[in-house]
Structure formats: structure tokens, C-alpha cells
Amino acid sequence: MIFWVSVGIGMLLLALALWTIVVKDTFAAVAAFIPYGLLLTLAWLILAAVDVALTEAAIGAGLTGALLINAASRLERAESSAKPRAPGIAMRVAAAMASLAVTVLIALCVLRLPDEAPMLAPEVGMHIGSLGVGNPITAVLLSFRALDTLLEAIVLLIGLIGVWSLASDSCWGGRPGQMQVVSSNDILVYLARVLPPVGVVVGIYILWVGADHPGGKFQGATVIAAMWLLTIMSGLRDAPMVSQRWLRAMLVAGPSMFIAAGVLGTLMADAFLAFPTGSEKLWIIVIEVALLPSLAVTLVLLLLGPPQRKDVQT
Amino acid sequence: MSVVDVLSVVSILWGTFFFVAGTVGLLRFPDTYTRLHALTKADNLGLGLVVIGLLPQVGHVLVALKLIVVWLLVLLASSDVSQLIARAVGRQEGGR
């Protein structure tokens, strides 16, 4: 039974992937990308990788989907004015050859993998007992491979700086995105009043259970970011000026806390990002809790895009 | 199979029936409004019946409560989103 469900999901995934590439309309491609992400979530669930499934649903389908919708609607004007030029036969042959070469290369790599794939899962299982956390994914992300997670958080921050630097000179430091004008009777306003309290609790819950069950700061931060975006989209609260001190402090608080913990590790446990024996779980929780608001704010600002307007001087 | 199990199976089957019916409606109905109408049956009744069918099987009150909360959240989100979609379509058609 589960086999046929997997086959069905696999075929749908391939079909949707093909559709997103072949379809001419950018918006239709994005519309297909989101169910693609949700189906991928089901695929991860069938593989019993619940953490990956959660991340795929929150970030792969939800956040990336929203980013792509933004991009598609921004590209709309540019696309219609750009004249599509049909590539010549030589170009087409070259593109086909290049694609074929990449496919063959990937196929060769996959086929040449050793039959018993090398894995580190037994190692993680052996050492997880010393940490005090029950979820092996959290153990890997925040202890065994904490450096990767730290760099991930910093990469997001650098990405945000990249987005901000697209702002024009006159808008530098202003508010990102367009001003939202929504009638106070709109259903969106109702949703933005009812949902955030629930969403914030869910986000913190996902962070908290991450220690022993699937979940964690990234998934929790995405839910909280979605709640803030909802209040901005409904016009209840305007987007913050990106030059504000508290905003920038929040952005760097998580990563700097992470780095500080790493440096403390060199003093107390002889290695960068090594946690003193006996209190590993406390350190992991402190880092996760510090990262959550920073990640949420970063994700919101990434979605809102570069600053586009300054407050009118009165 | 106990009586509870039979009730679960019946309820989940009813739920999947509404999902199938909603999907058929989404594919076959002529315009956006009727398609939305078909979809809400899948969300409200279909998911509701599946949740009711699962409740006796989960074995823990907290998990059961979580399932009910999931259903309520889907109700809230889907009803709001269908209204947003309907309004956007109405604006595009220049109605009202």
C-alpha cells in the first residue's frame, strides 16, 4: 500500500517538476512549485524524516513559495516588455548537449555510489547520550555540526544585506515594501487579529519540542515570521524602518550569541563551539532561543524586500 | 475489530469521500465561486470526518486535542482564503 502511495507521489513530483520548467508563464511555474514542495514534504514523511519534512513545508514550500510569488509579480512588467528571442539551432544543440552531459554525470555519480552508503548515523546514536537532547537532528545541528548552523544563520544575514543594498539612495534606511491599504472590514484584518496569538504559540512550541522531537528554531521562526507578515500585509502594522536600532540589534543578536557561545567554548571546553560537559543541553537551548527571534526577523525582512519608501517629513 | 474501530473506518471513509467529491468539483465546476464551494466541502467536512475517525485511535488526550486544533486552524484559514480569492475574482470581473 505505502509502496503504491510512494510511486504515486514520485510520479506527481516528477510531473510537477517538469511542469515548472516547461510552462511559459512565470506565475504558473510558481503555482506549481508550491504543491511540489508540499508533495516533497509527504515524500520525506514516508522516508520517516519528519524534521526534513517540517523544514520543507515551512521553508521549501511556504517561505520560498512566497518569495517566488513576490519575484514573479515583480518580473511581470519586465517580462512583458522584454522581447523573447527564439534561440538559433546551434544554441539549442549546445544547450541540449550541456544538459545531457550534466544528466550523464549525475547518473554516473549515483550509480558509482558504494552499495552500503557511508553514514554517520551510528556515530550520532553513540554520542547523543552525552548531550541530554533526544532529537538526533538537533544534536547534529547544534552540537556535532554546530559550525554549519552558525554559518547558515550568518548567510541569511548576508543575504538580507544583499537585498537591502538594492534600495535606491533616496529610500535607504526606509520602510521595505509598499504601503498596504486594506479596508478595516476586510477578512484579512480579521485573520491578522485572530491568527498571530495562535501562531506565535505554535512557533515557540515547535522550537521547544525540537530538543526531543521533530522541530526546531528554523521551523518555529518561519511560523512566527508568517504571523508578523500577516499583520503587515493586513495593514494593521506598517513594516519597520530598516534603519531602526532595535531591528538591527535583533537581527545580529542570535548569530552573535552563537559566536559568543562558541568563543566561550574555547575557554571552557578547549574548542570553538564545544560545550562544557554536563551542561550541553542548557547551551543548546540558550542558542536556539537566541536564534529564534533573529531568524524570524531576518525571514520577514527578506520577504519584504529592499526599502522602498521613507516616512514623509512633517 | 471493535465497535470503535468500525466507527473510525466509516468516518474516515466518509471523509475521503468528501475529499474526492471536492476534488471532482474543483476540476469540473464552471467558475471560481463554485470551485471554491466544492473545495470547502473537502476542508470542512472531509478533514473533520477524518479527524473524528482518528480521535479514538491516537490513544492520548493531548494528541487528540492537537488533531482538533489542526482541524479548527484549517477551517479558519480555508474560509478566510476562499473569501480573499472570491473577492479578488470579484474585483477582476469588475463586479460590485
Image (spheres, coloured by chain):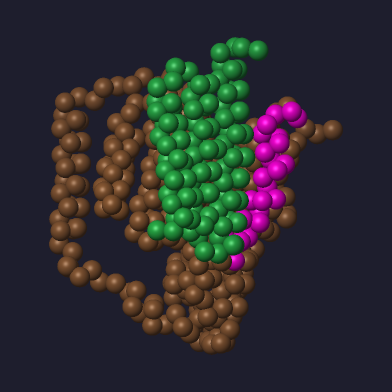
Q: Nearer the viewer, residue A81 or B12?
A: B12
Chain letter, colour brown in render: A
Residue under the image location 73 percent in, 55 percent down: A246
Taking B93 as reference, is B9 above or below it?
below
Residue at x 23% of width, y 68% of height: A117
Dividing the picture into quarters, in which one does residue A268 lie? bottom right
Dominant SS of magenta comes to helix
**Whether residue A64 can be seen here:** no
Q: Which chain is green?
A: B
Please tell me in which quadrant of the rendered image residue B72 appears: top right
Instruction: Give above or below for A163 relative to A186.
Output: below
Which x, y percent locates residue A100?
A: 16, 42
Residue drawn at point x = 47 percent, y = 45 percent: B11
Which is more toward the observer, A260 or A204? A204
- Stretch of the chain drawn in magenta: A184-208
On the rendered structure, is A186 left or right of B9?
right
The verdict on residue A201 being magenta is yes
> Viewed as shown, does residue A8 lie left or right of A97?
right
Q: Is residue A223 above or below residue A187?
A: below
Name the residue at 40% across, 58% down.
B1
Which residue is the extreme one toward the front?
A: B3
> Does the segment drawn in magenta span residue A269?
no
